[in-house]
Image (tube, rainbow, N blue to C red):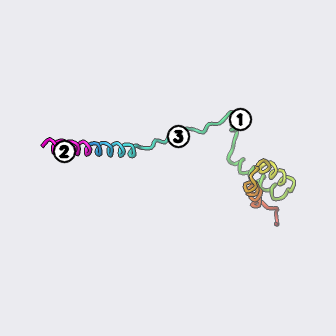
Amino acid sequence: MIINTALSLAVGVAFLATIVTASMVHAQQARPTVVVKHRPIVSQGEVSESWDVRQNVIDSKRYEQLLRTNPAFRRERMRIECGSITDPQLHQSCIASFDRYGPAGG
């Protein structure tokens, strides 16, 4: 009789422990993910107060035209943008990215 009672008590404790553990695991998995969003952090001088979308498009087109038509400008931009890259594959990838703006007629 005492053995049956002790055994029943042990099984009950084990069952209760399993339920509590399962509940805790489920509660940890069910926690919602909180995404905190904030404005971009920029230093003074990184953003022009007079920045204009239209002017940006004009400047971009001028830059692309110079890449296509002015070999000296193209070489200098490749040196500036790719020159500090020490990994051979990344360096080659940077140089290859200029192929999009190949010389006019080429």
Disc nearest the viewer among 2 and 1: 2
Residue at the location (77% across, 61% down)? 99
The magenta segment is 1-15
Disc nearest the viewer among 3 and 2: 2
Task: Using the image, determine if residue 105 lies above or below residue 34.
Answer: below
Q: Quadrant of the N terminus?
A: top left
Q: Position of residue 31 (x, y in %)?
A: 40, 43
Q: Give the residue at mark 1.
A: 45
Query: Badge 1: few (under 14), some or many (20 or more) residues near its Cα, within 10 Å?
Result: few
Between 51 and 4, the one lying in front of the other is 4
Closer to the chain start, of discs 2 and 1, is 2
Closer to the chain start, of discs 3 and 1, is 3
Q: Position of residue 35 (x, y in %)?
A: 49, 42
Q: Amino acid at mark 1?
A: Gly
Residue at the location (77% across, 56% down)? 95
Q: Position of residue 102 (x, y in %)?
A: 79, 61
Q: Amino acid at mark 3?
A: Lys
Q: Amino acid at mark 2?
A: Ser
Q: Give the distance between the C-alpha atoms of the residues marked 3 and 1, in whole angstroms.
A: 23 Å
Figure quadrant of residue 30:
top left
Q: Which mark is residue 8?
A: 2
